[in-house]
Image (tube, rainbow, N blue to C red):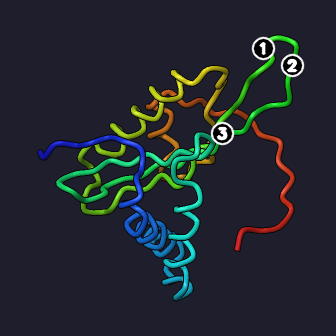
C-alpha cells in the first residue's frame, strides 16, 4: 500500500474538501445537492483553515485526499479548577469509497486522538455516529453515553 500522509488541511486542499463534502451528502441523501454548494463550501473551508478551534485533518495518499475529519473545539465557561477547559465535536468524518477498507480512516482518527491528547484542557471528543459507524467508533475507544438533546428543527 502507498504511504499515508496524515496532516492538517492546507490551502491547496480547499477544492478537494468541498468535493468530498458534496460526495458525502450525495451518499447520505441520494441527491446531488445545490449546484452552488462546491463554491459555498470552498469559501467556508477557506474561512476555517488554520483555525486552532476548527482544525481539519486529512489523510493523503499519492497526492489525493483520501479521508478527512473536521473538529470543532468549544471552550467551556471557566470553572475554578481547571479554569480553562474545552471539548471538541468530531464531524464530517469521510473516506472516499475507493480508499475504504484500507485502514486510512482508522489511521486518521488515531492521528486526531493523538492531537486531542496534546491539547491542554481538552477534556473529551464527542460525535454523533451513524448506525453504520457506531461499532467502529467504539473499537476506537469512544464510549456510548446518553445525551439529552433539544432539537430546534429537523435536519433538512
Looking at the rendered structure, the secondary structure element under dot 1 is loop
Residue 73 is marked as 3
Q: Earlier in the sequence, mark 1 or mark 3?
A: 3
Q: Are marks 1 and 3 in contact (CB under 8 Å)?
A: no
Q: What residue is shown with label 2?
A: 79
Q: Are marks 1 and 2 in contact (CB under 8 Å)?
A: yes
Cα distance between the residues tagged 2 and 3: 17 Å
Q: Position of residue 34 (x, y in %)?
A: 56, 86
Q: Residues within 10 Å of mark 1 (few under 14, many from 20)?
A: few
Q: Position of residue 124 (x, y in %)?
A: 64, 28
Residue 105 is marked as none
Q: Are marks 2 and 3 in contact (CB under 8 Å)?
A: no
**In the image, is residue 29 above or below residue 34?**
above
Q: What residue is shown with label 1?
A: 82
| Residue found at x 30% / y 56% | 66
Cα distance between the residues tagged 1 and 3: 17 Å
Q: Quadrant of the N terminus?
A: top left
Location of residue 14 by image quarter: bottom left
Amino acid at each position: 500500500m502507498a504511504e499515508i500522509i496524515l496532516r492538517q488541511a492546507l490551502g491547496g486542499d480547499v477544492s478537494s474538501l468541498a468535493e468530498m463534502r458534496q460526495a458525502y451528502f450525495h451518499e447520505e441523501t441520494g441527491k446531488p445537492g445545490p449546484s452552488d454548494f462546491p463554491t459555498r463550501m470552498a469559501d467556508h473551508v477557506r474561512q476555517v483553515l488554520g483555525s486552532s478551534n476548527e482544525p481539519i485533518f486529512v489523510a493523503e495518499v499519492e497526492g489525493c485526499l483520501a479521508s478527512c475529519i473536521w473538529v470543532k473545539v468549544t471552550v467551556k465557561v471557566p470553572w475554578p479548577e481547571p479554569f480553562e477547559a474545552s471539548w471538541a465535536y468530531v464531524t464530517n468524518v469521510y473516506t472516499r469509497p475507493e480508499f475504504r477498507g484500507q485502514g486510512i480512516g482508522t489511521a486518521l482518527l488515531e492521528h486526531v486522538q493523538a492531537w486531542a491528547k496534546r491539547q491542554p484542557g481538552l477534556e473529551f471528543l464527542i460525535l454523533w455516529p451513524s448506525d453504520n459507524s457506531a461499532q467502529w467508533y467504539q473499537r476506537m475507544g469512544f464510549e456510548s453515553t446518553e445525551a439529552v438533546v433539544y432539537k430546534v428543527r429537523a435536519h433538512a
